[in-house]
Amino acid sequence: MARERGKWFALFRELKLNSTPSSGNFVFFETRIPHAEFSAALLKGGVAIGRAFPPYDRWARISIGLPEENAIARSAVRQVLRGA
């Protein structure tokens, strides 16, 4: 899990996104776009994420899954946020 979490944090650095420190099974990061828009865009790519956490409507929480699941999710996040 730590290795996968590290890959997420590398993505956040690459995209210059704020994130919270984590040692759990999820990451929480700033998307810069409304949660509903971000979530819908990810879902089109086959990635489902959880609910918004008001007042952090421009942040997302993603659970860390298997390495192959995480690779798909990171790719989708990169694609959505590079266009944002």
Image (tube, rainbow, N blue to C red):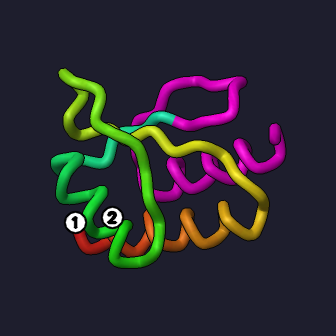
Residue 46 pos. (x, y %): 46, 74
Q: Which mark is residue 3?
A: none
| Above-or-below relation of 73 to 46 | above
- Quarter location, residue 70: bottom right
Q: Decide: marks 2, 1 in contact (CB < 8 A)?
A: yes
Instruction: Looking at the picture, tell me which residue is in the foreground, 75 or 65.
Output: 65
Segment colored magenta: 1-27
State the SS at label 2: helix
Q: Residue 55 at what x, y percent from top left? A: 19, 22
Mark 2 → mark 1, Cα distance in angstroms: 5 Å
- In this rendering, would 27 be left or right of 15? right
**Is residue 48 one of those drawn in magenta?**
no
x, y percent for residue 9: 61, 44
**Residue labelled with disc 2:** 81
Q: Is residue 26 above or below residue 76?
A: above
| Rendering coords of residue 25 (x, y %) | 68, 34
Q: Residue at x 33, y 64 (%)?
A: 81
Up-down relation of residue 51 to residue 15 (above or below): above
Q: Residues within 10 Å of mark 1 (few under 14, many from 20)?
A: few
Locate residue 44 relative to residue 2 in the image: left or right.
left
Q: The disc labelled 2 sits on which kind of residue?
A: Leu
Where's the N terminus, which quadrant? top right
Horizontal side, residue 7 vs residue 62: left or right: right
SS category of the residue bearing label 1 = loop
Please give the name of the residue rendered at 34% of the width and 77% of the height, measured from the top-left corner.
44
Q: Amino acid at mark 1?
A: Ala
- Front position in the image: 43 or 31: 43
Horizontal side of 56 relative to 49 (left or right) equals: left
Which residue is disc 1 drawn over? 84
> Which picture quadrant has residue 42?
bottom left
